[in-house]
Image (cartoon, rainbow, N blue to C red):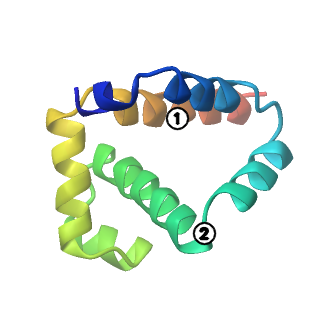
Amino acid sequence: MKIDKIQDGHGDEFFRSLLALETLEDCYNYFDDLMTLKELDSMIQRFEVAKLLVLNKTYTDIAEATGSSTTTISRVKRIIDEGNGGLLEMVHRIEEQDDRDLHR
C-alpha cells in the first residue's frame, strides 16, 4: 500500500480529523480551508468518474459528463481495478445511501 509511507501519527491525526466531520457544511468549510479549489475539484471529478465507471458508462460519455480527460478516466479505472478498494467502497456506500433516500 502506497499510503504506508504516511502512517506515522500525523497521517492518523489527519484521517481522524476527517472522521470528525459531522455535516456537509463541516466538509465544505474544512476542505475550503485545506485545499485549493483546483485540488478539491480534481478529487470531486475523480469520484464522479468512478461512479460512472461503476455504471459501465463509456469513456466518451464520462469525458462529456465530467470534463475529464481519458488519461484521468484511465487512471481512475486502474484504481478501481487494482487499488485497495477504498474508492469503490465509497461509491457503493453512496449508491446505497442514495437508494435508501429515494425510497423514503
Task: Decide which of 4, 41 is in the foreground and name it.
Answer: 4
Up the image or down, 34 lies above or below 18; here it is below
The mark nearer the N terminus, 2 or 1, is 2
Residue 77, horizontal then vertical, whole percent: 20, 50
Give the residue drawn at x 82%, y 30%: 22
In the image, what residue type sits under mark 1? Glu
Give the residue drawn at x 16%, y 46%: 78
- Residue wearing tag 2: 36
Q: Determine whether the residue tagged by mark 2 lies in a helix, strand or loop.
A: loop
Query: Residue 35's quadrant in the figure?
Result: bottom right
- Residue wearing tag 1: 95
Residue 75, horizontal then vertical, whole percent: 20, 56
In the image, what residue type sits under mark 2? Thr
Neighbour class for label 2 at 10 Å: few (<14), some, many (≥20)?
Answer: few
Residue 18, horizontal then vertical, whole percent: 66, 32
The answer to whether the residue labelled 2 contacts the one labelled 1, judged by CB atoms less than 8 Å apart, is no
Up the image or down, 47 lies above or below 79; here it is below
Neighbour class for label 1 at 10 Å: few (<14), some, many (≥20)?
Answer: few
Task: Decide which of 25, 31 is in the foreground and name it.
Answer: 31
- Image quarter of the C terminus: top right
Query: Residue 24's quadrant in the figure?
Result: top right
Q: Which mark is residue 25?
A: none
Give the residue drawn at x 24%, y 33%: 2
